[in-house]
Image: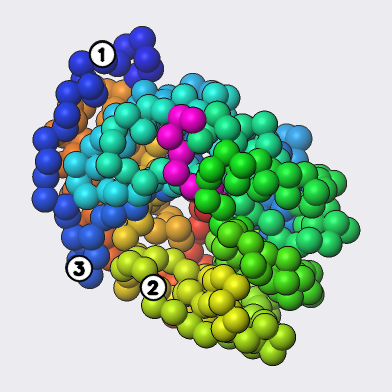
């Protein structure tokens, strides 16, 4: 169903409030990550390697993507079932034309924290429009400040400087910025200290992410993971840091602060210290499949339901039913029997 066939009255009516479902491990539904495109203009070697995502790779057609109207409707349904925070991601979400129109539509729902994860390649151009539309904050992915290393990692010769311009544009538009860096052994370990030094004392919160075994195309090996404990040690030796409490249940990053009061940083430890027990996140792929884990194997087709005329009540019942049966704790079981399971790509499901 698109804007022409989806009557406005359908989703302009408030969706009646329901009790937020909890899953089989007692975890409530609080966060929704929405991938708005499976395309990206970067070919990060650990995420969308060129050999796999080359010219003949078949990305989704436009008509396969959920429309903005469909997304707004789904978000209203998810909000009625407990979701408080929306993260727009991809692929590269800013490749989706007029993304600010979607942000404005989601802002009109009210009562939701709206965030965006981006490689910042188009952020300098888009930041003000996104802020004006009602975006609350932005997370920028940047894996190194060393131009040669960064260009080698994004594999499309994109410069560090242009990402930094995007960050500054977001800040100038009033958007709080977090900067996420994935650290891969033998590739960008030097980024740990360089980036800590650069962002220390700025309002931007730097977060290091352990390299994860998402998807099947990046040839992940445990040896490539730089454990968060090692990252902490590296920083602490030069800039002493201390842990601080998480601000809410389900927060993905462990928080640390510089002892000299010059700000905080985060560690996302999904490999060495998995946090499945607190995971309150659902994900919708660009074509409208609902996943209850980043490492999900099978999604539930919400688009088919939406396009076949399901009511909000019916959609809500499906979402609540899926969530209440949720058993996922992939990261905690990583070493058991998961190695051979087929997994979806991060670019498809949304990071
Ligand atoms: N294009 C946007 C961006 O660059 O932020 C959003 C999508 S991207 C898939 C989201 C995040 O996932 C990026 O920070 C990226 O570095 C991270 N990522 C991708 N593959 C990863 C992996 N195997 N392990 C850890 N993080 C990964």
Looking at mark 1, is its residue's CB closer than 8 Å to ligand 1? no
What x and y, as percent, mark residue 304? 33, 30
> In percent of the image, x 54 and y 24: which residue is there?
98
Label 2: how many residues lie within 10 Å, few (<14), some (14-19) or many (20+)? some
Q: Earlier in the sequence, mark 1 or mark 2?
A: 1
Q: Tell me the SS state at disc 2.
A: loop
| Residue 86 falls inside the magenta stretch | no
Q: Which mark is residue 281?
A: none
Boundaries of the magenta span? 132-139
Q: Nearer the viewer, mark 3 or mark 2?
A: 2
Q: Nearer the viewer, mark 1 or mark 2?
A: 2
Q: Which mark is residue 246?
A: 2
Q: Which mark is residue 7?
A: 1
**Residue 101 versus residue 172 in the image, above or below:** above
| Cα distance between the residues tagged 1 and 2 | 42 Å
> In percent of the image, x 53 and y 45: which residue is there?
175
């Amino acid at each position: 169903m698109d804007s022409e066939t989806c009557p406005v009255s359908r989703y302009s009516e408030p969706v009646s409030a329901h009790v937020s479902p909890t899953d089989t491990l007692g975890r409530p539904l609080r966060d929704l990550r929405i991938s708005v495109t499976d395309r990206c203009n970067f070919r990060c070697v650990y995420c969308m390697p060129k050999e796999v995502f080359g010219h003949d790779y078949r990305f989704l057609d436009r008509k396969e993507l959920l429309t903005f109207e469909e997304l707004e409707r789904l978000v209203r349904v998810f909000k009625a079932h407990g979701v408080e925070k929306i993260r727009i991601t991809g692929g590269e979400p800013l490749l989706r034309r007029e993304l600010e129109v979607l942000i404005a539509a989601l802002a009109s729902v009210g009562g939701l924290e709206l965030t965006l994860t981006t490689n910042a390649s188009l952020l300098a151009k888009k930041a003000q429009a996104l802020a004006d539309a009602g975006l609350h904050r932005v997370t920028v992915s940047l894996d190194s400040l060393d131009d040669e290393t960064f260009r080698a990692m994004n594999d499309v010769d994109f410069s560090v400087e242009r990402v930094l311009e995007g960050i500054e544009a977001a800040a100038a538009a009033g958007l709080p910025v977090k900067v996420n860096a994935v650290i891969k052994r033998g590739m960008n370990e030097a980024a740990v200290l360089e980036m800590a030094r650069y962002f220390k004392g700025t309002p931007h919160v730097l977060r290091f992410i352990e390299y994860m075994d998402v998807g099947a195309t990046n040839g992940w090996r445990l040896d490539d993971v730089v454990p968060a404990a090692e990252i902490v040690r590296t920083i602490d030796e030069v800039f002493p840091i201390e842990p601080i409490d998480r601000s809410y249940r389900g927060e993905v990053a462990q928080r640390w602060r510089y002892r000299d009061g010059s700000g905080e940083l985060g560690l996302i430890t999904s490999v060495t210290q998995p946090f499945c027990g607190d995971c309150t996140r659902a994900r919708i792929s660009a074509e409208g499949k609902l996943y209850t884990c980043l490492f999900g194997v099978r999604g539930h087709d919400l688009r088919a339901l939406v396009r076949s005329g399901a009511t909000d009540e019916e959609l809500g019942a499906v979402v609540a039913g899926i969530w209440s049966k949720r058993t996922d704790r992939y990261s905690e079981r990583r070493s058991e029997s998961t190695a051979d399971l087929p997994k979806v790509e991060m670019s498809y499901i949304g990071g």
